[in-house]
Image (cartoon, helix red, strand yellow):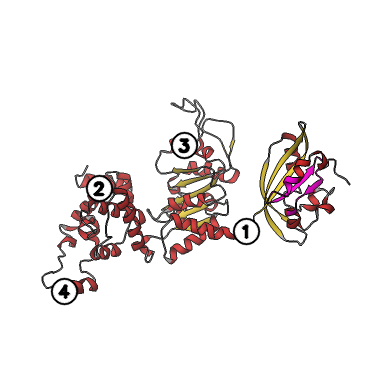
Amino acid sequence: MKPTFTLQSLPELVELLNAIPHGVVFLDTDLRIVTMNRFLEAMTGFDAHEAVGVYGDFILRSNLSSNDQICKKVLEDGQSVARDGNIINKSRLTIPIHFTLSRIEKDGSPVGILIVLEDMSALQAAKVDYLESEARSEIIGHSPQMESIFEFMAVLARTDASVLITGETGTGKDQVAEQLHKVSNRARQPFVKVNCGALPEALLESELFGHVKGAFTGALNDHVGMFRLADKGTIFLTEIGDLSLQLQVKLLSVLDDQEFYPVGSSKKVRVNVRVIAATHRTLKEEVLHGRFREDLYYRLNVLHLHMPPLREREGDVRLLLDHFQRNFSEALGKNFQGFSRKAIEILSHYSYPGNVRELRNIVEYAVNICQQAQIDAEDLPQFVLKASPQVPPQSAVHSLSLTSSISPDLSAVRPIGGWAEIEKEKILDTLKLTGGKRTEAAELLGWGRTTLWRKLKKYGLN
């Protein structure tokens, strides 16, 4: 059967088709093939002459083309549509395709549809390497543990499934979540971060889901909420373990249906959002104690990535020390010759309870304090010195013994005044590192905010 429209009435289109470096097919209003270019001939294995007059479904055997509704909608409203899918060619090979469908008009009336098919095979083949390299460009680490993280991130970035990131405070959960978004198909859409432990329950519900005017005292205007701001993108819920049971129910509903009611509204809102959650808590234990819903745990834990503590990342401490020292030195216009041997020995044996975040703050402190060409032990915070071994390693003892006039002075690293004095000094040094910000100090120390407040009061540091 001949198509209802021929290209003789649009001669300029004939020359354009073969100039496009992708597969192109032109369908009439009955969705029969008028012509297709040489790229699509090679892609499908069908010759243009044998395809003319045939319904597009029979040549473009696609998981999209079997549904004529997309084409009919484009013909009706004139809005171009882009979709990802695949086709099966004449040799029964499946080819991943990015489809773009556009309406063609003549004298203001639709005469057919132009479909551009971009072969995504090469891109998908290279995507894993690309994703891994992108992750490495933002997150520092060469240990076997981090190599596994980078490989798994490449897998996570290719899916829209929920991700639960666990790990101690300061291990880099936030950076991983943001990087997963950057290398995903949602990269051009918003990345919205919400700290579930930073706001009271009533305010957090409004912050997440929005509210309508008059929903509560002070609600003078509508508020869209973070889920609607993240529509078509990613929402990152950090400290998900601090979410109240009531809000856990509402979040579960969003994960299941992608719908929710804003506070005070009787009208549902629908969103398309990928959820990434993070916590330093052990959610299985929270479930056992009734503080976290089991069904929500399994719904969030579709894909699970655990960030290892810094003390388990062999060789990464030195790498991170050099990285942060260069960054802070450049920012301050200083030119250091790195760390002294003694400083490296101390920093290499420190346990870093605050993980990468603590290491970063220690280096920032040292770079600001140091007035010499090289960062030495005396430039490190006191709590690091007090936690370091009292006896230097053999290499250090040997180097000191070469000069009889020099003997190791260990008084700087020997705890004086008992544990209370050590703890007091540690609090003061941490507050200096955070610029007096108590919430950050509590995180570095591995305490809750109330614990830090209690100890400040105990030692008269308020």
Residue labelled with disc 4: 401
Q: Picture quarter containing residue 325? A: bottom left
Do tag 1 and tag 4 residues touch (Cβ < 8 Å)? no
Q: Which residue is mark 1?
A: 122
Closest to the camera, between mark 3 and mark 2, is 2
Judged left or right of residue 25, residue 356 is left
- Going by the image, does 459 lie left or right of 42? left
Who comes first in sequence, dot 4 or dot 2?
Answer: 4
Question: Which mark sits nearer the N-terminus, 3 or 4?
Answer: 3
Q: Is residue 31 magenta?
A: yes
Disc 3 + disc 2, Cβ < 8 Å = no
Q: Is residue 247 visible?
A: yes
Which residue is depicted at the point 52% across and 49% down? 296
Mark toward the viewer: 4 or 2: 4
User: How far is mark 4 from mark 2, CA to CA?
Assistant: 36 Å
Q: Marks 3 and 2, how far apart in space?
A: 32 Å
State the residue position of label 2.
Answer: 432
Marks 1 and 2, how far apart in space?
52 Å
Q: Earlier in the sequence, mark 1 or mark 2?
A: 1
**Pointer 1 and pointer 2: residues touching (CB < 8 Å)?**
no
Query: What are the residue bounds of the magenta stretch?
Result: 15-38
- The disc, 1 or 4, on the residue closer to the chain's N-terminal end is 1
Label 3: which secondary element: helix
Identify the image quadrant of the C terminus: top left
Residue holding disc 3 = 207
Vertical placement of 207 versus 348: above or below?
Answer: above
